[in-house]
Amino acid sequence: MASMNQIRDGAEEAQRRKYVATIVAAFNNSPLRGTIITLSVGVLTVVLATAYGQIVLNRWNQPFYDALQQRSLPALLTQLVIFFEIASALLVLNVAQLWLNQMLHLKLREALTRDLIGEWLRPGRAFHLARRGQIGVNPDQRLHEDARHLCDLSVDLGVGLLQAGILLVSFVGVLWALSSGFVFHLWGSAFQIPGYMVWAAILYSGTASWLSWMVGRPLIALNGDRYAREADLRYSLVRVNEQIDAVSVSSGEGNESRRLYADLGTVIAATRRIVSATVRLAWVTSGYGWVTIVAPIVIAAPVYFGGDMTFGGLMMAVGAFNQFHASLRWFVDNIGSIADWRATLLRVATFRIALLDAEDVGDAADRITIVRSTEPALVLDSLEMDVPLGIVRLSKSRVTIHPGDRVMVTGAMGSGKTLLTHTIAGLWCWGRGSVSLPRDGSVAFLVRDPYLASGTLRAALCYPRDEDAYSTGEIEDCLRRTGLSRLAPSMDHSARWEHELGNDDRRMLSIAQMLLQRPGWIVIDDVDDLIEGSSGERFVSLIQDELADTAILAMGTIERQGGLFTHVLRLRSVFHQAGGNRRTVSSTSRL
């Protein structure tokens, strides 16, 4: 049993090191690293100067309170002038630290979010992540809210810990020196305890820290669970908003309300558990907070009442004890934030690790190879795509598509046509064989649900190039040829075009993009909608006339010929059966 526990603990420790290492790697790879280091050095300098000012202020306590005890007005006025000098310097340092802290918040968030976005939007990586289960369901939550929260907590806790550590080192000597003169009188005898108030502060704060950790430790898991439930609710809300037209026409508002209420219920339940744990922790932290008001006076009282300490000396000792104790109880005061920080760190680190591992396909022998062809052609050679129930392959082992070729791949719904599109795009790599891309030509993809970039219509048409890649005349000409001349006056108008335009118009905008970009090869994910839609005749005309030199590889469910497609391929599925046997569903090829 002990061995199993050691193995488990070792695995958990290795996992924690991996989480920390991936965040450190994000920092080391950031172009903002130098700025962050400079700001951190600035914070350290200001904190050191502030600690020195606190020591000077603590020393000021003795002559000030002695002046009060002696009822000496000139001495009191002198000490007030000194106080305002010290306070002015500390005020400048406090404002400087606030500015440095806020800038550190800003730059650290920028660095982490830039790193996560850069890793997320590496070619094909977001596609793979979306198919890796729960981790890929709501990346926006990790990129936005979790990254912001982690950076805020890291700066606040980091600066707080630094300040507490410096004050601890600064005041331990002060408190030790003050304690050296403490004489205890008990039953007629006198004795000293070297560093009496230092040991008392350590015992007092250590007890509070241990008890706070025992009570507050469950908050780590509870915060992680709450963030997951919050992310699920946010994803559900966004999804309903994006599909509100379909929900409304189906009168599905009631059903969606029940789903959202259920997700909200899980958030409320998770938050309620955190509230209960926080209240339990508050009994400890608040209790120690109230006791701390009188604790240093009670600890120093035996010496004061013994006549070995003046009132000013007592107040100086109380001030030093409070500073020393505040440093030691930093953990007590921040146990909730530490638990929150650790839960957020795990979420962000897990997401970044998932991004780095998103394209891992295991055995390289079972990976489809993407290469550049030695000839101006798109070549599919011995291509087999793995699916959960078996494999999908084309009815011809080697397919070569030259400029101007018109090839159609047919198959029933769900037979793997979109999978073939993803494979040619280099997104699906599970399987065997190779895809050879044209050496000197570009391959463009026309998908079932076209993406229109945010911003102006001009930017959407030029995507993924810059919006000044084509002249106004070129864009207007392509809109005219695709039957979308009515949109020309709105070319520089910003809107959510995916909501402004119907699916047919969006598909024709994709054709307009093709006319602008003139790729050598076009892969069409679903050609049936284009041909059978209201703009079907115009689409066929554009393919035959405007894109006559462009190779077309189209996916569809209906076999079409008659001058548009000169070659037809069919998909063949081989399904695994119990015992390792395979059942083949094949078709003939006309290529």
Image: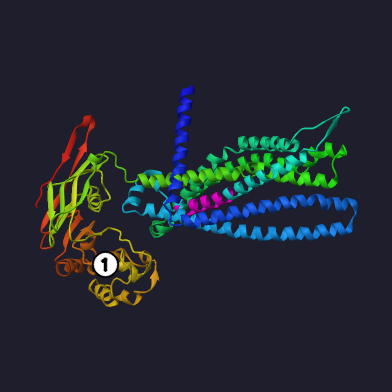
Q: Residue at x 39, y 66 (%)?
A: 496
Q: Position of residue 7 (x, y in %)?
A: 45, 28
Q: Residue at x 51, y 43 (%)?
A: 343
Furthest-top residue in view?
A: 1
Q: Most prominent secondary structure in the magenta stretch? A: helix
Q: Residue at x 19, y 50 (%)?
A: 435
Q: Position of residue 364 (x, y in %)?
A: 25, 40
Asked whether residue 286 appears in the rendered view, the answer is: no
Query: Looking at numbered disc 1 in the image, what kind of residue is underneath it?
Result: Gln
Residue that badge 1 annotates: 513
Q: Residue at x 44, y 43 (%)?
A: 21
Furthest-right residue in view?
A: 71
In the image, residue 147 lies in the stretch drawn in magenta: yes
In the displayed structure, does residue 234 sit left or right of residue 574?
right
Q: Position of residue 62 (x, y in %)?
A: 81, 49
Q: Position of residue 161 (x, y in %)?
A: 60, 46
In the image, residue 126 lies in the stretch drawn in magenta: no
Which span is picked out in magenta?
143-157
Q: Residues within 10 Å of mark 1 (few under 14, many from 20)?
A: many
Q: Nearer the viewer, residue 321 or 64?
A: 64
Q: Nearer the viewer, residue 70 or 223?
A: 70
Check disc 1 and report its element: helix, strand or loop: helix
Question: How was this image coloured?
Answer: rainbow
In the displayed structure, does residue 193 sit left or right of residue 8?
right
